[in-house]
Amino acid sequence: MIKLIGGKRLNTAVFISGKGSNLKNLIKFSLKKNSPIKIRFVVSNNKKAKGLNFSKKYKIESRIFTYSNKQITENQILKHLKKREIKLICLAGFMKILSKNFIRNFQGKILNIHPSLLPKYRGLNTHERAIENNEQYSGCTVHLVNSKLDSGKIILQQKVKINKKDTAKTLKKKIQKNEYVLYPKAIKKLISTL
Ligand code: GAR
């Protein structure tokens, strides 16, 4: 459990790889009056990530890490996080897997949002697989990150009904709408204000 001392906002970093709609949503959440987080840093492994436009727009410092060598890159990222006193990391569509060593540095302090009802459909192409298997429901999960893919402790989940007419595209859209509500809720749940 993360505790806030004296109602101070927790310095948070968001890691992205693409569109960044969750980043945008988390920035908006962080700007609310009683938000428990302050987003101080955005990490992207992709220089073309559209989400970088949001960090620019809201004047949040961001950096692109090209990942030519995973260990070196992670050590660079860790240095940047320590320098900015980051206490919480939110993965938001970040498509790189963090090493055990990296996670050890932020044990219990890295959250991820995944577009399925974990433990079902870990990994990629979740919507395609859920539809192919005639699932009645899919959804999204916010969980802590551990060294196994999409396997850490679940903080919150939201079920979403799959309709007969749903395609991977329509299901993704429906689930993402729910992600925007679930992620802030899960952050609040993880951080207990004193
Ligand atoms: C989100 O829907 C998130 O659930 C998914 O990537 C999308 C990123 O969208 N994450 C994963 O698949 C992680 N395994 P965004 O860039 O618009 O926030």
Image: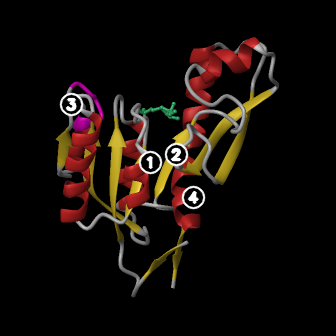
Circle 1 — which element? helix
x, y percent for residue 21: 40, 36
Identify which residue is drawn at 64% across, 15% down.
128
Mark with earlier residue (4, 1): 1
**In the visual, does 58 lie left or right of 110?**
left
Mark with earlier residue (4, 2): 2
Instruction: Residue 64: name its quadrant.
Output: top left
Q: Is mark 4 within 8 Å of ligand 1?
A: no
In-front residue for pair 171/128: 128
**In the visual, does 188 lie left or right of 133?**
left
Identify which residue is drawn at 74% across, 12% down.
132
Q: Which residue is mark 1?
A: 100
Main structural element of the magenta stretch: helix, strand or loop?
Answer: loop
In-front residue for pair 73/56: 73
Mark with earlier residue (1, 2): 1
Q: Would you call the spot at circle 4 few (<14 residues within 10 Å), some (14-19), or many (20 or more)? A: some
Q: Are marks 4 and 1 in contact (CB under 8 Å)?
A: no
On screen, 145 above or below 19?
below
Magenta-highlighted residues: 48-53
Q: Which residue is mark 3?
A: 66
Verify whether residue 167 appears in magenta: no
Q: Any mark on residue 184, and which?
A: none
Which amino acid, by three-letter code, is at mark 2?
A: Ser
The reply to whether residue 191 is visible in this rendering is: yes
